[in-house]
Amino acid sequence: MARSSTRPTSRDVARAAGVSQAAVSLVLGDKWRGRVSETTAERVREAARELGYRPNLAARNLRLGRTRTVLLVVPALTTEFFAGVYTGAARVAAEHGFGVVLYPSPEGVGPARDPFASAQAALDGVIASSMAADALTAIRGDQLPLVMLDSDPEGSLGAATVNLDIADGVRQVAAHLLALGHRRVLHLAADVPSWTFEVRARELAARLAAVPGTEVRTARAPISIEGALAATEAALTAPGPRPTAVVCDDDKLAAGAYKALRRLGLRVPDDMSVTGLDDLALATALDPELTTVRLDAELFGERGMRALLAVLEGREPDGGDIPVELVVRGSTAPPRPPA
Amino acid sequence: MARSSTRPTSRDVARAAGVSQAAVSLVLGDKWRGRVSETTAERVREAARELGYRPNLAARNLRLGRTRTVLLVVPALTTEFFAGVYTGAARVAAEHGFGVVLYPSPEGVGPARDPFASAQAALDGVIASSMAADALTAIRGDQLPLVMLDSDPEGSLGAATVNLDIADGVRQVAAHLLALGHRRVLHLAADVPSWTFEVRARELAARLAAVPGTEVRTARAPISIEGALAATEAALTAPGPRPTAVVCDDDKLAAGAYKALRRLGLRVPDDMSVTGLDDLALATALDPELTTVRLDAELFGERGMRALLAVLEGREPDGGDIPVELVVRGSTAPPRPPA
DNA sequence: CGAGAGACGTTATACGTAACACTTCGGGGC
DNA sequence: GCCCCGAAGTGTTACGTATAACGTCTCTCG
């Protein structure tokens, strides 16, 4: 009980147990089979417990040259979706003795190198979703192992990518609406420059164009209920024949669309079908419940982490997009026969 | 360009600039006024830029004995609320050169010391919300500076606490409902053992008891839409006079209550008033929009971080609860006159 | 002209850990 | 009886940084 003011080091434990610091390191690092006797090992463990010893991570990181810490860059913490991604990634990470640090990337164009200035912990690698190109090149330049989530496989400078099969989700939505008989569709698009949203637009247009006589109009809105409300209202009061269905880039936009429709006196799904994408809790909170595409966020995070581990170990990450699933609920129905 | 395979160190920069490693440290650490000439300093900066030098955080942390990293423990990432807390805390932290690492505490009783095993980064301090008592004593035992969010000031073992004035929010809700004429209230309580929820129950009961002839019934539900739906439905189909208002412990529970009411054929607010607490995006997505208590999550995180900084610097953290505000929307109205 | 004071650096060291290389000792094989 | 080997440790070093302590050299002032 000499100097209880400062945290005990492995040397303090060694002194207490009457062994060398090296022995403590061996025992506590579980590398002592055949190098230290069981009785001595127990004595060391006892001393460590007694003193409340916990290794200094900074020293260990310095010595080992790696941190077993990984950075997860997410565009926003505000969504259940990325919470799920984190949960999945953190679970896999924990299984492999890794920790995950979150970095919510600032809106718009933040300082490109910020993730690293800001993430004070040293990092072994990065998992990033929807990252600006300049930040991306910065990381690549740093030689930091990198996995991109939901990004253009072509445009990611050779970084590994893990993607949800969003295109297939959009295909399912399109097929569902076409089967119900819809021909005029409003695409409520997220006004965010990101590959994942480009895919939605491209795929929706392609699928509808495959059927003669269809027409798709596009409205852009920031991802917020207010923004979606305004954009939807504007699009639906524009001249020309009114669409019979609104396809939204995500559930939050769909919530805004619901409000716009209420305001315009249109009923879901009788006057207008609505679809979302994400399957957040919000989807079932809406009335009627929202037909949407379920994304398995946890699996997504899990696969992202596994891919990063593969990169770290020099292996090739598994390919293959993550399947998604259309969940049909009460917000879609056949269009009214034209009056 | 000798060894480009490994990351350059300050010594490499020194060699390139023709100075000592110490000089590099001084220049890059901005401590060189009057110790190094401007021309030399520029030469060092140039060399550092050239080599793409970035300091090794692990080494710095070891040397300085502090990490400028703080752990934020949150019960769940799934809510906008804690996203806001993080945002506020991270902003203040960044202003002071600190980073924030998130640790979503596992549901229920996780391994108490897990936050520290799991957070691989070494920590200067911890901000924790709704933490289990055993984990709390573990941190206290570690002498880690600690700030508790929304916790019983009495039960936090002397740790600093920062609280929202939830009690006042509940008072405002109670006053609002009483003023409208409600006398029979159902309290839809979160089935989570946490001080912050105890406060809601205690305060609501006290306020209503102050007015003769009032009656409060309690239903408990896990914080999920499904759980709230079931609990509300059960409570409202129980025998006895039906309440005229449902006071929910948070907005998510309110969303479940809405669904239960729809299922029972009761209209909001005509047949039943509903109130929430949090003011999430969900609140305005509901129809009618939810009367709720707005909590300033970002300010909360900000105050938490400031308090931790104060503790770290040996100062006394500012006291005082954070004010909250009742937001009256369409979900509350006078009760129907008894038929 | 001598000395003190800047200006401009350098040398040396410590932070706490893990790992390599080495020592000591008792016993078993031949 | 000798050698070798395994068990059980210990001594030492390096990871990369920040800083305290210590030179020089030049300039200025009395």
Image (spheres, coloured by chain):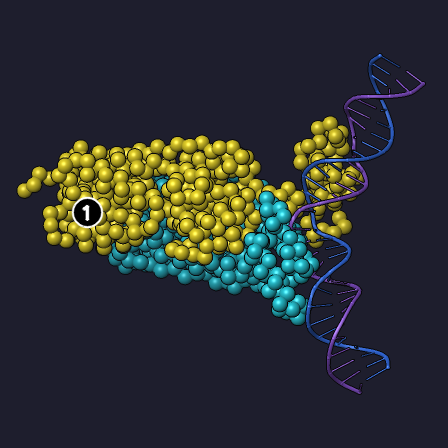
Chain colours: A cyan, B yellow, C purple, D blue
Residue A103 percent location from the top left of the image: 50, 46
Residue A321 percent location from the top left of the image: 46, 61
Q: Quadrant of residue A46?
A: bottom right
> In the rendered image, which quarter contains the C terminus of chain B?
top left
Instruction: Report whether A29 appears left or right of A241.
Output: right
Foreground pick, B16 / D11 = D11
Q: Quadrant of residue B322?
A: top left
| Residue C28 in the image: above or below residue B241 | below
Secondary structure under tag 1 reads: strand
Residue that sits furthest to the left in the current view: B339
| Residue A87 in the image: above or below residue B53 | below
Instruction: Report whether A73 appears left or right of C9.
Output: left
Residue shown at the point (47%, 33%) measured from the top left: B317
The amino acid sitting under disc 1 is: Arg
Residue shown at the point (69%, 52%) measured from the top left: B6
Chain label for disc 1: B
Residue shown at the point (41%, 50%) measured from the top left: B133
* Whether residue A275 is visible: no
Residue bearing mark 1: B217
Instruction: Report whether B153 appears left or right of B126.
Output: left
Q: Quadrant of residue A112?
A: top right
